[in-house]
Image (spheres, grey):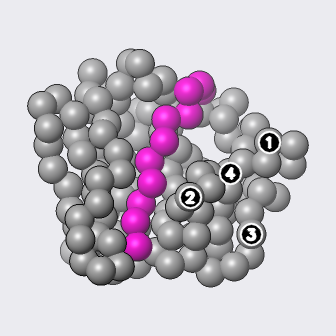
Amino acid sequence: MPFPMPALKQVPSPNYTPTAIAHDLVIVHMMEGSYAGSVSWLCQKQANASAHLCLKADGFEVTQLVPLQHRAWAQCAFNGRGVSIECEGFTAKGFTDTTMTALARCTAAAGLRHSLPACAGRKGSRILFASRSRRGRRRTHRHLRRQ
């Protein structure tokens, strides 16, 4: 079943490694800033950072900076293992329902495209995203606080 995705813009970043990644998880980060400012910064060579996708907080736009088959420079430990999504906003403010819905669509689309097993849960007011390790054990990767 296809998931409706927000409009996708292509803005290439020079900050990536053109090697294949394992595609066994999706990593979500907060931008700690604005959508336009973060996209602009991640496309500058001196940033030495990137992400596969940047999601606007209103959920109506996604910018792809790095091809999904290549290694983005989002986090050292997992760059070779998954698709990275940066969400507009600040960690202290959490995610709005609109952003969570758009993030769920992006995550589901990436999961379907790369045959990732779905594994998510809820802990209080936080959304828990997890993946399966290569040996099949559950690993927790991120708690997302809702507003």
129 magenta-colored: no
Q: Is residue 102 visible?
A: no
Q: Which residue is mark 2?
A: 77
Disc marking residue 47? 1
Q: Which residue is mark 4?
A: 50
Q: CA distance from mark 1 to mark 4?
A: 8 Å
Q: Quadrant of the C terminus?
A: top left
Eye-nearest disc, 4 or 2: 2
118 vs 96, nearest the viewer: 118
Q: Earlier in the sequence, mark 4 or mark 2?
A: 4
Residue sitting at x 58%, y 70%? 80
Report the span colored magenta.
24-34
Q: Nearer the viewer, mark 2 or mark 3?
A: 2
Q: Specify the amino acid type for callout 2.
A: Ala
Mark 1 or 2: the one toward you: 2
The kind of secondary structure element at disc 2 is: loop
Q: How many residues crowd mark 2 within 10 Å: few (<14), some (14–19), many (20+)?
A: few
Label 1, label 2: how far apart the Cα atoms are? 18 Å
Q: Element at badge 3?
A: strand
Q: Is residue 21 above or below residue 120?
A: below
The local crowd at label 3, few if under 14, some if 14 to 19, many if 20 or more residues have their Cα within 10 Å, is: some
